Amino acid sequence: MEPELHPDLKPLEFLLGTWKGAGVGDYPTIEAFNFGQEVSFTHNGKPFLIYSSRSWLIEKDGSVGRPLGTETGYWRPQPDNALEVTLAHPTGIVEIYLGRVAFHRIDLQTDVVARTATAKEVTAGTRMYGLLPEENGARDLGWVYEMAAMGQDLQPHLSARLKKVD
């Protein structure tokens, strides 16, 4: 039996479930690529969402390639549609994002990026998540990530379109 949704999570309710799809990545320090992704938003009745994401390379021939990024964290709604997001990456990077929820759109900006001595240099990021216009009776989840890393200014890095699978 699933726990009752905490009232503070109402503005984020549209995220709940598992989403799967594909996206594109690019950055000045790497070659452009296509990737597949699965994102999950769940809750346990407390005032936060539990988030996880995993992605994999899509080869030029369309086949599934090696695993790429993974991240886990918590999305914590605050008064007046503010939002705090904590994310941890197995590559030694931890991020804290602050942002806002407006209808079915979320805008986030890093407040803190911390990294271990062996992690690549990431200094800032922005993320936007939102429900896309309805297509074939369903609304997909789109997201965009801009990153400042490896001596580069903040610029587009990843984007994807995900379909709800549950």
Image (cartoon, rainbow, N blue to C red):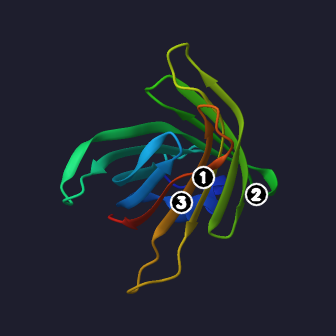
- The residue sitting at the top extreme is 117
Q: Distance between the residues labelled 2 and 3?
A: 19 Å
- Kind of residue at disc 1: His
For the question of whether residue 142 can be seen, the reply is: yes
Q: Which of marks 3 and 1 is in front?
A: 3
Q: Residue at x 32, y 64 (%)?
A: 165
| Label 3 packing within 10 angstroms: few (<14), some (14-19), many (20+) | many
| Disc 2 + disc 1, Cβ < 8 Å | no
* 87 left or right of 64 in image: right
Label 3, secondary structure: give it.
strand
**For residue 144, above or below residue 150:** below
- Kind of residue at disc 2: Asn
Q: In which quarter of the image is residue 70?
A: top left
Q: Residue 51 in the image: x percent, y percent?
A: 48, 44
* 110 left or right of 50 in image: right
Look at the image and tell me in which quarter the C terminus lies.
Answer: bottom left
Q: Nearer the viewer, residue 43 or 130?
A: 130
Disc 3: which residue: 143
Disc 2: which residue: 81
Q: Residue 125 in the image: x percent, y percent?
A: 65, 43
Q: Which of marks 2 and 1 is in front?
A: 2
**For residue 163, above or below residue 32:** below
Question: Sequence order check: which comes first, mark 3 or mark 1?
Answer: 1
- The residue sitting at the bottom extreme is 136
Q: Quadrant of residue 80?
A: bottom right
Q: In which quarter of the image is residue 160?
A: bottom left
| Label 2 packing within 10 angstroms: few (<14), some (14-19), many (20+) | some
- Identify the mark at residue 6; answer none if there is no mark: 1
Q: Which residue is drawn at 64% across and 66% down?
A: 105
Q: Nearer the viewer, mark 2 or mark 3?
A: 3
For the question of whether residue 2 can be seen, the reply is: no
